[in-house]
Each structure stands twice: as C-alpha cells, then as structure tokens.
Amino acid sequence: MNIQFKKGVLELCVLVVLCRKDYYGYELVQAISKNIDIAEGTVYPLLRRLTKEGYFKTYIQESATGPARKYYQITEKGKEYQKELLEDWTRFISGVNNLIGKEEVA
Amino acid sequence: MNKETFLSELKRSLGRMPEGEKKDVLYDYEEHFRMGTAEGKTEEQVAASLGNPRLIGKSYAIDSLLEDHKEGGQVTAGSVVRAVFASISLTFFNLIFILGPFLGLVGVMIGLWATAISLPIAGVGAVLGPVAALIIPQWVSLGGISVFFWIFGGIGVAALGVLAVIGMYFLSRLFLKATAAYVMLNARIVTRRR
C-alpha cells in the first residue's frame, strides 16, 4: 500500500487507540502492529509530532516489573482532532465502498 | 542488525536536530529494545520489526524542519533544499513528484534572474555608448540613432532592470516558501490539516 496513505491512516489509528486508555510506547506499537502491517519504528515519529502539536501529553511511571515507562495520554485537543479525523475517514471509506459497489454492478 | 547499529544509524540520520532532542528520540527506541528483549525477542528481531533506521530518522528530520517553518522560523535556501532532499530519500513517489517540479522551477528561476540582471547591465551599456563613441569612434557606432535616445533609453532600461531585480528577490522568497509548503503537503498528503 502507498506509504503516504498508510501514514495518514496510522495517525488516525494512534489517536483512536489512545482515546481508550493511556499506553506506553511499546504497548501502543504492539497494539497497532498486531492489526496493521507497519514498520513499528514509524509510530514513534508520529507520537512525537502529535505530542508536540498538543494532542498528547506524556508522563513517566515506574513499573513493577522493570524500568520506568513513558506513557502517552490524549488531551482534549487530541480528542477533538480524533473526532474530526474519524469523520473524515468514515466519509472517505463509505465513498470508496460506494464506488467499488457501483463498479461491480456496472 | 543489532541494537547498537540500529541506534547509531538512527542517530546519524537525525541530522541537525539539537543534541537534547536526539537523546529524547533515541530514548523511545532504547525503551522499545528493552521491552522487546524482555519479551524474549532478539535484538535483531526487534530491529527488523522497527524498520529502516535511516528512513525513520529522516521522518524526524522532516518533522522538525516543517515545525521551524510553521513557527515562522527562518526559511533559507539551504533549509528548503535540505527538506527537499530529505523527502526524496523517503520514497520513490517523492522522487518524481518533488524533484521534477522543483528542478524545473529552479531552472525557471535561474532564467528569470539572468534576465533581470542583464537589464541594468544593458541600460548602463546604452548610456555609456555615446561616451565610448566619442573616445573610440573607430570601434563604436551609434547606428545613426540620437545620443538622447541612447542615454534616456539606457536610463529607462536600467531602472526597469533594478525593478526586475527587486521583483525577483521577492519572487524567490515566495518560491522558497511555496516549496516548503509543498513539501509539507507532500509529507501529509492524506490527512487534511488546517
């Protein structure tokens, strides 16, 4: 699949996943790569950019099993942005599906 | 590729990012390696699933550059050219859609600059023509055209040329800014942003 396209979709996925709960980097990457075939390393630049743009906050938390982990938490701004992107995506997908459906009939 | 190679390649490809930020970026990957190996994966497996460290580094470099741009930071010819080349190395798609138009427009800009610069030179030449015709009449002919025409015409052309050079200065700046914006569009081609 086109890399640019995947990148855009990845942004939406990260936002959607973080809307549910806070994740630390590794956990988030696993949650996404379990469902979508991506180079895992591409998630971190995205996280960093979205954090810089104020969509996420980060905090460090000690873990019982190992060293401290960096958690990502979505902000209000992030939630709003997620909603917008999700709407865009839904509209886009239903449009594409519509076209594909028509193609088959024709 | 083991952890050490991955991290050092990533660090190298981060380019001109400040040291503090580089450390910050690398921290995420160190943590990733730590957790991956704790799960029983080898360093090589973790590195393979992360992807190409050089491409990852480039996307940080582009992000930090675009950030400078958005914050109204200095857009210089150098920084724009670097952004263009950083984008190119990301995908072949960009090779066609950025490099082609970019080089074409650079050619047009060079042509326009040459024209703009030649005008004042021609103007000064025209003004000096009658003087030269007085000193070395055997080499310079006014072609039967009035001295006033040479002088005033020359001044006119020179003034026009100065205006053209000033215009080109602003056009060049616009071109650099537009290129930076285009690279940004290209990097985020799918997500619509305000």
Image (cartoon, helix red, strand yellow):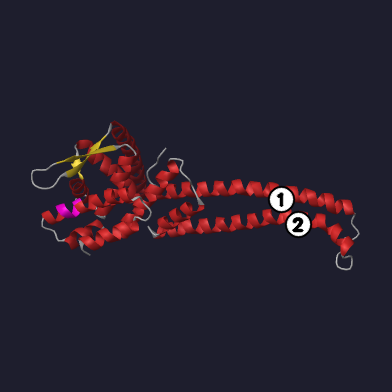
Q: Secondary structure at mark 1?
A: helix
* Secondary element at tag 2: helix
Q: Please name the residue that numbered disc 2 is placed on.
A: B122
Q: Chain of mark 1?
A: B
Residue A30 at x, y percent in the picture: 19, 49
Quarter where residue B108 is shown: bottom right
Is circle 1 on the same chain as circle 2?
A: yes
Residue B14 as seen in the image, left or right of residue A40: right
Q: Residues within 10 Å of mark 2 (few under 14, many from 20)?
A: some
The spot of residue B57 in percent (x, y) is 33, 55
Chain of the residue where label 2 is placed in the rendered structure: B
Question: Pointer 1: residues within 10 angstroms few (<14), some, or many (20+)?
Answer: many
Task: Write the residue at 32% across / 51% down.
Answer: B19
What is the number of the mark on residue B161?
Answer: 1
User: Type of residue at label 1?
Assistant: Gly
Checking the image for residue B189, the label placed there is none
Vertical comparison of B110 with B139: above or below: above
The residue shown at (21%, 53%) is B30
* Of residues B38 and B127, the one drawn nearer to the viewer in this rendering: B127
Q: Which residues are magenta?
A: B31-35
Image quadrant where one finds the C terminus of chain B: top left
Residues marked 1 and 2 touching at CB (< 8 Å)? yes
